Image: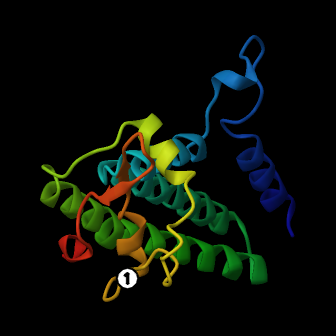
Amino acid sequence: MGAGVGASVSRVSRGPCRRRAGTPTAARISGITPGGLFCWYAVLSLNHIGHAMEESLWSLLMLMLSAIAGTAALAADGSLRAMLIACFLIYGVGAGLTMAFDVRMYVRRWRLRTDDPRLTLATGWHDSRKPPAPDDSLGGLARGSTVDDSLFQHRCVDESGHGAPLSQPSDHVL
């Protein structure tokens, strides 16, 4: 590895994450933390826009990694250059596929289900902590549904502990 590559990698590693005088570490939040928060919001509230925002952040992070790898590849040579070019291509393709498929899918689900009931975060948390009903022989899956469908088959629970499905599995087929 040449001296130029080592300096480039060193600059990239220090980049925007370098500690600045007077800037508290907690004030700088990475893209991962908001992505996780959007995901949990979507899971607990049954609102797909949170998943679309999460996937958009992942796509942005992959695009940034692609740009970093591509920039570092310009200064590298030999097998390191080949590896960085492969990273550039893989992360770039991953970002494109995430935007083309995942984000579009969640936005479409969000648009189709604007009238579906949403849970408050407290209700969603309570619902996620409940074990499946004892007569649930399929472990949360209704016959004819997919694993993804089962994630959104939450139950409204009344004071007696009995619940009723918010929607049928067939409502979740796109």
- How crowded pointer 1 is (Cα within 10 Å; few <14, some 14-19, many 20+) is rated as few
Image point (70%, 24%), residue name: 26
Relative depth, front residue between 33 and 168: 168
User: Residue farthest to the top?
Assistant: 22
Image point (37%, 36%), residue name: 120
**Where is residue 7 shown, x and y percent of the image?**
81, 51
**Where is residue 38 shown, x and y percent of the image?**
45, 45
Quadrant for the N terminus in the image: bottom right
Circle 1 sits in a helix, a strand or a loop, which is it? loop
Image point (51%, 43%), residue name: 125
The reply, left or right, for residue 87 in relation to residue 44 is right
Relative depth, front residue between 44 and 49: 44
- The answer to whether residue 26 shows anywhere in this view is yes
Number of marks:
1
**Where is residue 99 shown, x and y percent of the image?**
34, 65
User: Residue farthest to the bottom?
Assistant: 144
- Examine the rendered structure and indicate whether residue 92 appears above or below residue 23: below
The reply, left or right, for residue 114 in relation to residue 87 is left
- Examine the rendered structure and indicate whether residue 53 appears above or below residue 136: above
Q: Quadrant of residue 74?
A: bottom right
User: Residue farthest to the front?
Assistant: 160
Quadrant for the C terminus in the image: bottom left
Relative depth, front residue between 50 and 55: 50
Colouring rule applied to residues:
rainbow
- The answer to whether residue 97 shows anywhere in this view is no
The reply, left or right, for residue 9 in relation to residue 54 is right
**Where is residue 76 shown, x and y percent of the image?**
73, 69
Tag 1 residue: 146
The reply, left or right, for residue 79 in relation to residue 169 is right
Q: Amino acid at mark 1?
A: Thr
Image point (59%, 47%), residue name: 32
